Amino acid sequence: MPPDAEFDHPAVRALDVQHVDGQGGAGIVLTDRLGVSEPTFVPAALLTIVGRCDGTRSLARIRAEAAAQLGNGLTLADVREVVGQLAERGLLLGPRFTAAVRAAAAAFAGLPARPARHAGSAGYPTDPTELR
């Protein structure tokens, strides 16, 4: 698969979405339950692009629809930049995400012991000695 495969019809993968309105402004935080990607803040101004990355639209169609909604001079380069940042962070389905999942799985499988995932919650103690 060519390195630009994510750009053909970009698709944001399944992520948790939390609406925020803080010091950085309004937007959403995309959180990966798999832990492959770091939480990512998406400013409200970019949601017209990110929300259209569902795998059914080309970059040109995303640009056209977002520009019509925004009523501004959004360029294909602007859309490509946003999609590139999503891909770089592992938030799109595609080869980068697949490689990141494989690397995370290999790292996990290579651990001598599994991390205490629920330590300090659900009635499990936080002290490693007590956990043992």
Image (cartoon, rainbow, N blue to C red):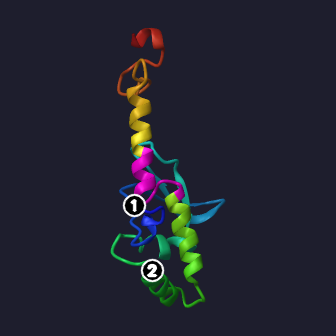
Instruction: Give the image quarter of residue 125.
Output: top left
Q: Is residue 97 magenta?
A: yes
From the top left corner, tell me how far across and down residue 2 is, in percent: 44, 63
* Label 2 Cα neighbours within 10 Å, binned few <14 / some 14-19 / many ≥20: many
Label annotation for residue 1: 1
Q: What is the x, y in percent for residue 132?
A: 39, 10
Relative vertical location of residue 123 with respect to residue 47 in this rendering, above or below: above
Q: Which mark is residue 60?
A: none
Is residue 16 shown left or right of residue 49? Answer: left
The image quadrant of residue 78 is: bottom right
Residue pushed farthest front? 2
The stretch of residues the image draws in magenta is 88-100
Q: Position of residue 100 (x, y in %)?
A: 45, 46
Numbered disc in front, either 2 or 1: 1
Q: Earlier in the sequence, mark 2 or mark 1?
A: 1
Q: Residue at x 48, y 76 (%)?
A: 48
Q: In this rendering, is residue 18 above or below 105? A: below
Q: Decide: is 57 above or below 84.
A: below
Q: Which residue is disc 2 drawn over? A: 62
Which element is circle 2 on?
A: helix
Q: Residues within 10 Å of mark 1 (few under 14, many from 20)?
A: few
Residue at coordinates 47% horizontally, 19% vertically from top-left? 126
In the depicted structure, whether residue 7 falls above or below residue 58? above
Q: Quadrant of the N terminus?
A: bottom left
Query: Disc 2 versus disc 1: distance between alpha carbons?
Result: 22 Å
